[in-house]
Amino acid sequence: MKPYEFAYGPRLIAGSGSVSRLGALLPPGRCLFVTDAQLIGLGLADPALAALDEAGIEAVIFDSVEADPSQATVLGAVAAGEGCASVVGFGGGSPMDVAKLAAYLLGSGDSLDSIWGVGIAKGPRLPLVLVPTTAGTGSEATPISVITVGEGVKLAVNSPPLYADFALLDADLTLGLPRHVSAATGIDAMVHAIEAYTSAHKKNPVSDSLAREALRLLSANLIRVCEHPDDCDARGAMLLGAHLAGVAFANAPVAAVHALAYPIGGLFHVPHGLSNALMLTHVLGHNMPAAMADYAELGLLLDPSLAGVGRQAQAQGFVEQVASLCRAAGVPLRLSEVGIGAGDLDRLASEAMKQQRLLINNPCEVTEADARRLYESAL
């Protein structure tokens, strides 16, 4: 067996109402509560804030996190958290990514510009609990934080100190999410599972097992939560699937779908999950010669009736199954639907090439010409 290492990440607490345990997981003292204004306005954070209050913990609310959070937002959270003893990240991937960095920067005293990259952040951080309110990013499971720096450029910190102490999966917090949010975040989680399973670096039997189970849960429940937003069991399955996909890709990193999605989000402010959905099947097609065996295995997972056909047909069946799920979920599948035109393709391709940390994980090479062709096929 080829040697490998695997990190499981935070301690997991899951179940309906589990957010009520939040206060018991944190030390005494003020807590920096990182979220966004919409979640505060909807009252979705009320149970978490009540749990902190019941435990005698004062919440310092930082609710200025935007989609694709900026470096300025991270620094604003750090400033707000001066003197706090702990940090909670509550929301989608953006608040959780900001919370991870705030906890680290407050605990270590390091500067943000000194820790970009893989394995550079090595200092201490404040106690950290992450609470996802969408089933998508898996950020609560990973030591990765992605931040927008400059126009459309995303940089990441990827280092073990960013792992949270606890991840709380409470399906009640995701009930009633709008269809477009459920669809885009669910597809995002599926991409995590797929890219972990085919990653050219650090793919291993444990990440494979988690990615397969994640994809099984997500594919079986995606349309259910879109059509029945208050189905708590389906919501719970999606949360678990997204979490398992997060654990998988924290160990076997994502690749070209994400690399090509980042410029779409950064330049055109398209939500990350939707950006992934727009490029998913096109990148799968590009990868087919190198990833056919893996895609065939995933094809059988999604459609056991493919057992009677050859490997190439199984792999193609997988791509068709993924495309069918995306269509049924109702997400836009053409770049033109989100305001991107032919005149934007050169810039998108050039920006995608800056994501070498992701492109090196792809099963096969993606050149700038390849990237432009893939964007054109998605137009």
Image (cartoon, rainbow, N blue to C red):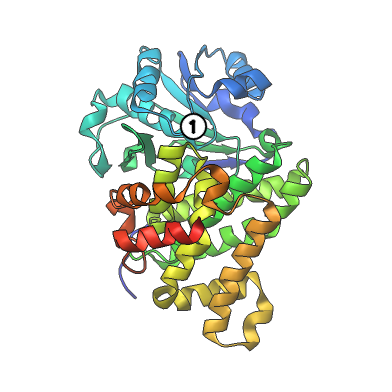
Q: Nearer the viewer, residue 261 or 303?
A: 261
Q: Residue, x 40% and y 18% (percent of image)?
A: 85
- In the figure, residue 90 lies in which quadrant? top right
Q: Residue, x 43% and y 34% (percent of image)?
A: 97
Q: Residue, x 25% and y 32% (percent of image)?
A: 123
Can residue 136 be seen here?
no
SS for dot 1: loop
Residue 327 x %, y %:
66, 58
Q: Total of numbered circles in the picture?
A: 1
Residue 316 x %, y %:
56, 76
Q: Residue, x 37% and y 48% (percent of image)?
A: 348
The answer to whether 255 is drawn above or below residue 48 in the figure is below
Residue 208 x %, y %:
47, 65
Q: Nearer the viewer, residue 8 or 138?
A: 138
In the displayed structure image, the side of residue 48 where residue 253 appears, left or right:
left
The answer to whether 6 is drawn above or below residue 271 in the figure is below
In the displayed structure image, the side of residue 338 where residue 97 appears, left or right:
left
In the displayed structure image, the side of residue 262 where residue 187 appears, left or right:
right
Crowd tier of the residue under label 1, counting other residues whose Cα lies within 10 Å: few below 14, some 14–19, many 20 or above: some
The N terminus is located in which quarter? bottom left
Provide the residue designation for mark 1: 67
Q: Residue furthest left?
A: 114
Residue 262 x %, y %:
41, 45
Can residue 276 be seen here?
yes
Q: Amino acid at mark 1?
A: Ala
In the displayed structure image, the side of residue 9 where residue 234 appears, left or right:
right
Q: Nearer the viewer, residue 316 or 15?
A: 316
Q: Nearer the viewer, residue 123 or 223?
A: 223
